[in-house]
Image (tube, rainbow, N blue to C red):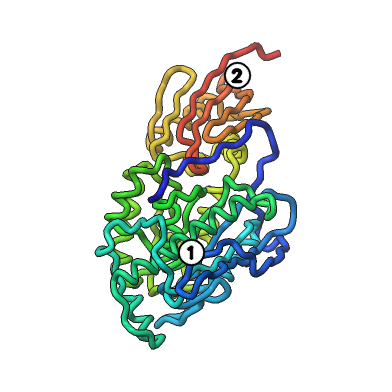
Amino acid sequence: MGRAFRPRRRKLGRHRPRRPYHPGLIAMRIEADIPFAEVAVAAGTRTLMMDAYLPEGPGPHPALVLAFGGAYHRGSRKDDVFAGARGSNTAMAEYARRFAARGYACFSIDYRLAADDAPAGPTPVLTVPGEIGVQRMDVVRQMLGMPPASHADHMRIIEGAIDDMAAAGRFVARQAARFGIDPDRIVLGGWSAGARAALYAALAEGVPCAGVIALSARMESGDLAAHLPRLACPPPVLLITAQDDLGTLPAETPGMAAALRHHGGEALHVTIPGWDHWYPAEAVTDAGTSVEATMAEALERWTRSGEALLEDFAAAYNRHDIEALLGMVTEDCVFETAFGTRHQGKAELREALPGAWRQWPDARWDGAQHVVNGDRGFSEWVLRGTDAAGTRTELRGVDLFRLRHGLIARKDTFRKPYAVP
């Protein structure tokens, strides 16, 4: 069964924050046909392969592990482009190329398909098999000239894909030094069947990850109820579905996002107006950004180092950018001031933060130093400002932070004034 997700901890120390690179500026190389698991199939065993798309330049890089779609019956790590009524989807291999150019080490993986006829694995995670619709699998079987399969056979096929995705995620983490990646900043993802495998690998199998990107996939409500309570800290999830996506995806995906938030996770669901299941990376979501840009925004936040987050927070404070500050905190954030005042949630913070700017219009943090260890961090700084009467104030202080999936969940401030020469 799935095991609890526990964030890995970083070693204490100051180091240069590592950020995703800007698109178009990073050269990349491809390492093809990397074996990552030996698995059972009807004919004996099969060696599963992945292709690595690795950015040049100093690491360690954040990583993205992607699984293709195809209803568990077709597609591969190199090509899963299929034509729909309104266009074709973008292949996972193409996403890997694009995000490698942004500075992410990307891995496009294979997994067992229906033709492999894999036996049942040792870690079943589908707790309510009857909930899972198999209509699309039946349609594809008919398209491929394959005979009908039983519901039990379909479940065995899906379980095999989940096991293989989990194996890929763990392999990449174990081989972090080889690939020049940070094992604390690995994101799982995919499209359609591959996205479902990614969701179950992270949320049911408990594969440690910094987040999950699911293009047109979800977990069943019964499985969410069975597995989410076991997770100590669910990874953040981005769910993208099309307006006219397959089956009940458009109607039921919001329920999955709500379940994740109920269990303390961060979840975002966006839709793509005017498209069906087969949409390209350039399709525009209801948020006004493309699918690729939406993915990039989530990846940047989830894989940003803690030091970089605190550095960006200080910079936003210095330019008095309230929207940027609120974009770096959780919905349920708690800020405790040096005077014992408590601000909880974004709404209270929106009103409280400009207070210092009104008192000191030129208020800024200078000389900030940031240290992060796992989900805890602290910053040392000097707050300087001049009030309306021309009186200059300097306050030396520290902030103690609790971080959660790339956002600030709590900030406690301690400070003391000292004479200004």
Residue at the image position 50 percent from the left and 68 percent from the top = 111
Left or right of 181: which side holds 222?
left
Disc 2 marks which amino acid?
A: Leu
Please, what secondary structure does the residue beneath circle 1 have? strand
Residue at the image position 60 percent from the left and 47 percent from the top = 183
Give the number of the disc on residue 395.
2
Residue 204 or 94: which is nearer the viewer? 204
The answer, for residue 111, to whether it is visible in the render is yes
Rate crowding at label 2 as few (under 14), some (14 to 19) or many (20 or more) other CA atoms within 10 Å.
Answer: some
Outermost residue toward the bottom?
145
Q: Mark 1 vs mark 2: give the one in front.
A: 1
Pointer 1 residue: 190
- In the picture, the quarter occupied by the C terminus is top right
Disc 1 marks which amino acid?
A: Gly
Residue 274 or 266: which is nearer the viewer? 266
Outermost residue toward the top?
419
Residue 295 or 156: which is nearer the viewer? 156
Q: Are marks 1 and 2 in contact (CB under 8 Å)?
A: no
Left or right of 65: which side holds 279?
left
Rate crowding at label 1 as few (under 14), some (14 to 19) or many (20 or more) other CA atoms within 10 Å.
Answer: many
Please, what secondary structure does the residue beneath circle 2 have? strand
